[in-house]
Image (cartoon, rainbow, N blue to C red):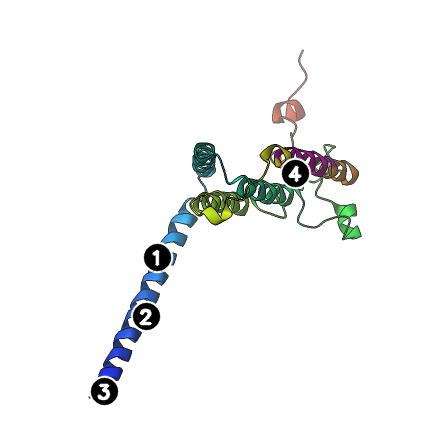
């Protein structure tokens, strides 16, 4: 009798685990499906991220706390921004990349070279959005509300931002690249009328 009960309980537990695994797999597949569909809609995606950021800022303002969470979030966003503005191959680490470079054309005869980011736009957006969601959830747990003097954290973050962006701009000037692709170069040909036309009387 006991063996039968234990086997029944084991079968029930196994069935529940299988059902939970199936539900998790279906939910993950559905999430990935809608995530893929949002890829071409950059404006809508970023508007949603701005809404998430506004909700998080309102939450922090209302509770007047969780400044250490906001500071950690700011450091993480700064790290993402550097990855977004950096080329996939760092010329400082790969000297051959400095010769080829991700620079945009400066003369009409130059070949167009699109800027390839170390962190693509979609991954940049997804990481930022997920960071705001995680930070928002953390504000509901008092263990993360560490008492700190927030003006010092804010000043330190501003100084860190200025120094980091200054270093990034110096890097861009040194290796002559622009972190944005300003459209493909267009070549203007001669008009057929001017090349084949006869002179006027």
Instruction: Please give the range of residues in magenta.
Output: 154-166
Q: Nearer the viewer, mark 4 or mark 2?
A: 2
- Give the Cα separation between the discs numbered 2 and 3: 22 Å
Q: Nearer the viewer, mark 2 or mark 3?
A: 3
Relative to the observer, which residue lies in front, 167 or 105?
Answer: 167
Q: Nearer the viewer, mark 1 or mark 2?
A: 2
SS at mark 2 in the image:
helix
Relative to the observer, which residue lies in front, 38 or 164?
Answer: 164
Q: Is residue 16 above or below residue 75?
A: below
Q: Are marks 1 and 3 in contact (CB under 8 Å)?
A: no
- In this figure, which residue is indicated by the disc labeled 1? 27
Q: Is residue 166 left or right of residue 51?
A: right
Image label count: 4
Q: Is residue 49 visible?
A: yes
Q: Residues within 10 Å of mark 2 (few under 14, many from 20)?
A: few
- Give the Cα separation between the discs numbered 1 and 3: 37 Å
Relative to the observer, which residue lies in front, 56 or 126?
Answer: 56
- In this figure, which residue is indicated by the disc labeled 3? 2
Residue 91 x %, y %:
76, 48
Relative to the observer, which residue lies in front, 200 or 194?
Answer: 194
- In this figure, which residue is indicated by the disc labeled 4? 179
**Residue 25 magenta:** no
- In this figure, which residue is indicated by the disc labeled 2? 17
């Amino acid at each position: 009798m006991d063996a039968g009960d234990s086997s029944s309980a084991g079968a029930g537990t196994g069935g529940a685990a299988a059902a939970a695994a199936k539900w998790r797999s279906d939910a993950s597949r559905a999430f990935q499906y809608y995530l893929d569909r949002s890829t071409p809609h950059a404006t809508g995606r970023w508007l949603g991220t701005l809404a998430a950021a506004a909700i998080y800022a309102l939450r922090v303002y209302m509770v007047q706390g969780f400044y250490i969470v906001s500071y950690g979030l700011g450091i993480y966003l700064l790290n993402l921004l550097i990855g977004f503005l950096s080329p996939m191959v760092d010329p400082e680490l790969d000297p051959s990349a400095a010769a080829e470079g991700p620079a945009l054309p400066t003369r009409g005869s130059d070949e167009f070279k699109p800027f390839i980011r170390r962190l693509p736009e979609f991954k940049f957006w997804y990481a930022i959005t997920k960071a705001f969601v995680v930070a928002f959830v953390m504000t509901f747990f008092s263990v993360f509300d560490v008492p700190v003097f927030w003006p010092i954290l804010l000043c330190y973050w501003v100084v860190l931002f200025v120094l980091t962006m200054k270093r990034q701009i110096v890097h861009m000037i040194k290796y002559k690249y622009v972190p944005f692709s300003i459209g493909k170069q267009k070549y203007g040909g001669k008009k057929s009328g001017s090349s084949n036309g006869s002179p006027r009387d």
